[in-house]
Image (spheres, rainbow, N blue to C red):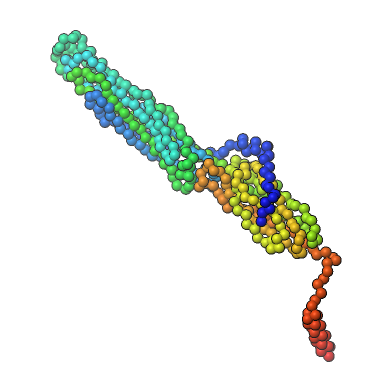
Amino acid sequence: MSLKPLSAVVSSYIALLAVSASAHAGVVTASQDFTVAVSAPALSGTGKTSQKTSVTTSFNQFDASKGVLTGVNIGTKTAATSVQNTSVDFSYNRNTPNGTTTGAVQSTIGFDAAGASDSAASTPSKTTVNCTRTVAAPNTAAKCGSGPVLNTNNTVAAASGKAAGTMPDELSKAVDNAYLNDYVGAGMVDVTESLEVNASNSGAIGGATVTTKANATWNGATTLSYTYLEHASAGFDGIAGDTLDLDFGSYNLGDKVGSLNFSLANLLGNRVALSLIKISQTGDTANQFLTNLDMFDDLIAGGSTLFQADFSASAVGMHYASYVLTFGDYAPDAASSSLYAGSTLNLNLYGAVLAPANQNVDVPEPASIMLLGLGAAAFGLSRKRRQR
């Protein structure tokens, strides 16, 4: 039963708060290597082409027995061997005029997981091939790129240019809180790493057949980190164990009895807040006990709440009341599937009321007296028969 006029007093001890605020949450981290390779379709002439591919790495979900999941961060680290390449190949003859052709490639890396994704593009790498005739007149020698100088005796030659560039170094993203439950359980969670290559060619050299090729390889490691707090832990302040017995002692009927105070605490640690979610009472058939026990939601680690119990001493006898208090975690921004509920504490109240020494004794009714007399007479007759 609840005594509403008595309000709960929350003791927010500054020292306890300082310890709790400065504590660090637990972290579980796992990392896996991966490789993604992709080639864009060969591009003839001017224009653009692209190709995308992906791989998947899998991680164990967070084990809620460790605590309450408060955050997930996913990131990738690129290895030094990651590279993007572009090349321009073409054939030409001695009549090929002056000109320039440029092939370019740009790679985009990224990852995608439940509630988190990130991507970044590399700096484009380019290769340029220049073609220069030695004289302006037709049918005279020409030189294109790294190819030989063509004179009037050569009709076809090949030239090429190549370039390479590195990939972005790191990607990182925190998982949106709305998706934290996807990371809790006994299964796996997937992270997809993707690589896209975009190739292009611009410019032209008359009479040349231009082919642009592009490819990229992304070697890296994906790291997934779980941040968590310990589960709430309820206790009676200053009392070891899960049961508190409060004995009011013995009183005469109608005596005034003082109150007994007790407190509920969320034990110190890197833990979430505590909720009192259910109060179940048994005993106290004579309604001799009152408490101001009331449910609460957000008792921080290291905090305690003061309550009061009263005994009325208005009925003769031995009195007893028992309360089972059920608690749970409170962390509205955490993964709800990692919250625990159902831990209990037991509060027992005792008190005795004695009848005063000068209390009047009820006089039996006449019929009761007659029956009592007959019983005594029969008892005496029986004793006489035994003596004979």
Residue 381 rendering spot, x and y as whole percentages: 82, 87
Residue 297 rendering spot, x and y as whole percentages: 60, 46
- Position above or below: 219 against 384: above
Q: Quadrant of residue 371?
A: bottom right
Q: How many numbered marks does the figure carry?
A: 0
- The quadrant the C terminus occupies is bottom right
- Of 145 and 268, nearer the camera is 268
Q: Residue furthest bottom?
A: 388
Q: Quadrant of residue 46?
A: top left
Residue 70 rendering spot, x and y as whole percentages: 53, 40
- Position above or below: 271 against 215: below
Residue at the (39%, 36%) spot, across then down: 193
**In the displayed structure image, the side of residue 256 where residue 108 appears, left or right:** left
Residue 81 seen in render: no
Residue at the (51%, 39%) spot, across then down: 71
Residue at the (25%, 19%) spot, across then down: 203
Residue 253 rendering spot, x and y as whole percentages: 79, 62
**In the displayed structure image, the side of residue 329 where residue 169 appears, left or right:** left
- Position above or below: 329 against 118: below
Residue at the (69%, 63%) spot, across then down: 285
- Of 336 and 198, nearer the camera is 336
Residue 166 seen in render: yes
- Of 277 and 388, nearer the camera is 277
